[in-house]
Amino acid sequence: MMQVTLRTTSSDKSAARRWQADHLLAAAFETELGWMALTHRGEMLAGVVFGHASKRQAMVSLRQNLGRGVVAPAIVDFRDVEELPDSMIGVVERLRAYAAGEKVDFSDVRVDDRHLTDFGRRIVTACRRIPRGRTRSYGQLAADCGSPGGARAVGQAMAKNRYPLIVPCHRVLAAGGLLGGFSAPQGLAMKRRLLMLEGEALCAR
């Protein structure tokens, strides 16, 4: 692969630092839940998409998700999985295992949450505590975050979740055990599939 050397004269140093900060290495890979793609900043996961019918669709979706609401979106540079750092290769392996129906723990995967508000970070933390095979309602998750009555805000945060499966937004349901919404490909059919994969009994509605 051709290597590109950045010029590092004094006038270019700040631009080079910006390039390094905004240049994300990514990879797309096939699983039993369709094509997935992920990217990272340092040792932190910056984004995940899944459920796509092709590699190209996964790549486009990842770029769109990262650029949503951002004035100057990061450059996403797709490489082979083997070119990712070992920590991210490990995440890829776990995502493949999860898609195959294995019980996988993502609790140690660090996520880049700098784009979130304090409330958004609390939502992500509370969502990650929902165990496999269990669910919480939007209202319950809002209460867990110290904001009773904030169900709508939780729903909006889940719809913008950049790390599905790692932050298991599919385990968050509407009131009364209804599935609610899901922004991944195939929508509620995919949400139901994930809950069935995890053995959740409330997935029929």
Image (cartoon, helix red, strand yellow):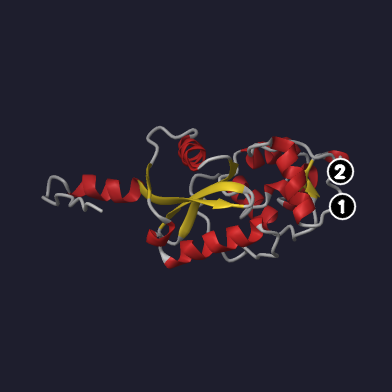
**Quadrant of residue 174 within the rendered picture:** top right
**Quadrant of residue 99 within the rendered picture:** bottom right
From the top left corner, tell me how far across and down residue 137 is, in percent: 80, 45
Q: Is residue 48 visible?
A: no
Q: Name the residue nearer the viewer: 9 or 196.
A: 196
- Classify 54 as above or below 144: above
- Classify 45 as above or below 69: below
From the top left corner, tell me how far across and down residue 200 is, in percent: 82, 54
Q: Is residue 56 left or right of residue 123?
A: left
Which residue sits at x=53%, y=59%? 92
From the top left corner, tell me how far across and down residue 197 is, in percent: 75, 54
Q: Is residue 105 visible?
A: yes
- Tell me how far mark 2 sits from mark 1, CA to CA: 7 Å
Q: Is residue 74 left or right of residue 203?
A: left
Q: Name the residue nearer the viewer: 112 or 117.
A: 112
User: Quick check: marks 2 and 1 in contact, CB under 8 Å?
Assistant: yes
From the top left corner, tell me how far across and down residue 120 is, in percent: 61, 46
Which residue sits at x=70%, y=65%? 103
Which residue sits at x=40%, y=32%? 71
Residue assigned mark 1: 201
- In the rendering, which numbered label is found on residue 135? none
Residue type at mark 1: give it: Ala
Q: Secondary structure at mark 2?
A: loop
Quarter holding the C terminus is top right
Q: Name the residue nearer the viewer: 100 or 73.
A: 100
The crowding category of the residue bearing disc 1, from other C-alpha atoms within 10 Å (few below 14, some 14 to 19, many at least 20), is few
The crowding category of the residue bearing disc 2, from other C-alpha atoms within 10 Å (few below 14, some 14 to 19, many at least 20), is few
- In the rendering, which numbered label is found on residue 204? 2
Q: Secondary structure at mark 1?
A: loop
Which residue sits at x=14%, y=49%? 7
Residue type at mark 2: give it: Ala
